[in-house]
Amino acid sequence: MDSKDLMKKTEPQKILSVSALARVEGEGGLFIKMDKGKVTSCELKIFEAPRFFESLLIGRNFHEPPDITSRICGICPVAYLISSIAAIEDACQVQIPEYIWNLRRLLYCGEWIESHSLHVFFLHAPGFLGYPSLMEMAKDFPKEAAWALQMKKAGNTLIQKIGGREIHPVNVRIGGFYSSPKKLDLRSLLDILKRGLDYSLLALQWIGLKFNFPDFKRNYTYVGLKHPKQYPIERGIISCGESQFNAKEFEKNFIEEQTTYSNALRWKATDSRSCLAGPLARYHLNYSLLPAFLQEKLKEIGLEYPCHNPFQSMLVRLAEITYAFYEAIRLIEDYEPFSPSFIPFDPNPQTGYGISEAPRGLLYHKYELDDKGCIRKAKIVPPTCFNLASAEDDLKKWIETHSEDSIERMTLDCEQIVRNYDPCISCATHFLKLHIW
Amino acid sequence: MVMKKLAVWKFTSCDGCQLSLLDLEDELLEIDKNFVISYFLEASSRSPDPPFDISLVEGSITTEEAKRKIIEIRNHSSILITIGACATAGGIQALRNFASLQTAKERVYPQPELINVLPTSLPISQYVQVDYELQGCPINKQQLLSVLYSFLFGFRPSLNSGSVCMECKMRGTPCVMVSSKTLCLGPVTHAGCGAICPSFGRGCYGCYGPKETPNSPSLSRWAKEKLSIESTVLKQAFHTFNCIADGFKRFDEED
């Protein structure tokens, strides 16, 4: 009996269950109920065991959140370092000089390159081409896999040179850095960064022209940072729908939801609309700040602006890799070592807010300090908290418009729809198995 | 040479240690030629196909389901290697072992009753026999490579079991405790990172966990006397990524 027969048997109400694979991690699944072709409920479950970071931080010294919270994510630790530092510096009302912000931006460029390369080539591309992994894809696409590995390595090398190591860098502290890198050490990276930029353009050409992206659009509410002068990475002002506000007003503009079916909290706009964070949102809000050569390239490969197709987030991610290489080269060419390497300051019994653009989107930190410099309260909102709700809305629309597809087809597509968001449970990338009851 | 069948598993953790394998950009495709990567959810959609010659395990055990799963993995694996501070020592999330779980749930979740976890975060070795432990938050990817190839060729891995302090001396970095009176856990911390922090003028913060036979009480006493470090600061310095590891847990007690 094929799967469609199974679906018809339960008419008019159909229940689709995408349960977790027999495995240990990122326990996620999808449960969908349909009635007369309409999705009546769609639940994207995340069972990843909670680690209670916001509780562990209470009572810790105000110097500690960067190193502790970077352990939330081994793929984007720099984002956690920078958002937490910005929040503590905000509480203590310290002005950080531009040269320190520039080095933070440079470090962050390394993370965008490394994390985006991992997602585009290791997680997303094999799904479009029908391979289980990049390693297997590499056998048929050796040249393209080599670009991917070289780009990823360049991003990691940049983080390692500034931060000491790729995963959980050690050279970042509140007020600045433990030590400012030598000019020659950074300039020695220019070669691999310039080559990386070339590879990213080749990859844009390859993926833009050769991959088939499903024709799918949704009317998104984009949430992301905006900045008057540069494509936002390490700082900016929050933009959501029609409104713009700073990090301090974050919790007034969004609502937090806990569902009965998931360990991950969800954040939505105050009218309960889901919001999309990440590359597609940044592209939408800041397209005009991309360099002209990149805008030209994107036109050439057929990536439109505006782009509301979540599958094409892959191209936007690649464009952001190109941008991060371009920006890293510029920042290194302008770089001068500085001393002292950080601005010393005393704690202040205030609440501080920090926000930056993690590779997957907006990352918000809030800390309340006491007069001894200990954390009294902490709040952290990672981008996946926005994107889970948005992914559910994508899945609903997809399933309603593709209800005649085979279960095999629908499983693959549902997996790619979740993967479009690069959800920060990295294994959420290969975790769906579709059953119909 | 017979290819070894490799599986990579994750429990409660940040993904960083298994990412180390993918961060071996120059070696990855070569590894794929020498090992059958049978199960690696972060990188491949292949379903598990037991038994396995080598299982790499990341993360700590924090749920009932995980307790069942790790026993199953052990039963299907010839060699089980834990990678990183979470799997080897409970990780940063083991800080919650010192406090009330109910309080932790209430601080983070609007509906704490929906969260179902064990009262502790514990290392893999609390539940099953472990053949080799690779310390570090995160692990050193070159050490991971060395361990994998040791097992491929049938050797026991031979990694430096000394301290970060010794790595620092070999590197020729001036001592941060002597030169800038900065607290450094290097003398009691397991080698492996290559003494990165002192090379940036920062004291070691112990992310590789205790070395063999660490004398933490002596370092604590010294830090109090010579560097005027307060007890609360010392306690927090030891209570991070390896907070329940013997040697760091009782950092200020005389034996």
Image (cartoon, rainbow, N blue to C red):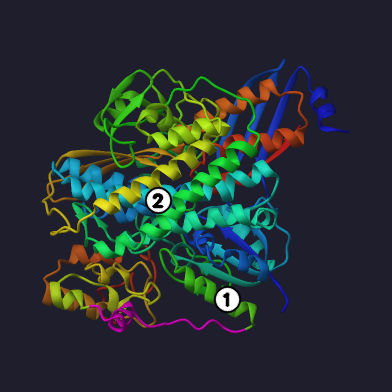
Q: Which residue is mark 2?
A: A111
Q: Nearer the viewer, residue A188 or B119?
A: A188
Q: In the rendered image of this protein, does residue B202 appear above or below residue A3?
A: below
Q: In the rendered image of this protein, does residue B63 appear above or below residue B250?
A: above
Which residue ends up furthest to the top in the rendered image? A36
Q: In the rendered image of this protein, does residue B96 appear above or below residue B179?
A: above
Q: At 73% from the left edge and 76% from the top edge, which residue is drawn?
A: B2
Q: Nearer the viewer, residue B76 or A143?
A: A143
Distance (Cα) linking label 2 and label 1: 34 Å
Position of the C terminus of chain B by quadrant: bottom left
Q: Do dots 2 and 1 share one subunit?
A: no
The amino acid sitting under disc 2 is Glu
Q: In the rendered image of this protein, does residue A30 appear above or below residue B234?
A: above
Label 1 Cα crowd, 10 Å radius (few <14 / some 14-19 / many 20+): few
A128 falls in the magenta region = no
Q: Chain of mark 2?
A: A
Residue A376 image offset from top left, x and y in percent: 23, 44
- The quadrant in which residue A67 appears is bottom left
Label 2 Cα crowd, 10 Å radius (few <14 / some 14-19 / many 20+): many
Q: Nearer the viewer, residue A286 or B8?
A: A286
Side (left or right) of A312 relative to A162: right
Q: Which mark is residue B131?
A: 1
Residue A371 image offset from top left, x and y in percent: 12, 47
Q: Which residues are magenta?
A: B155-173
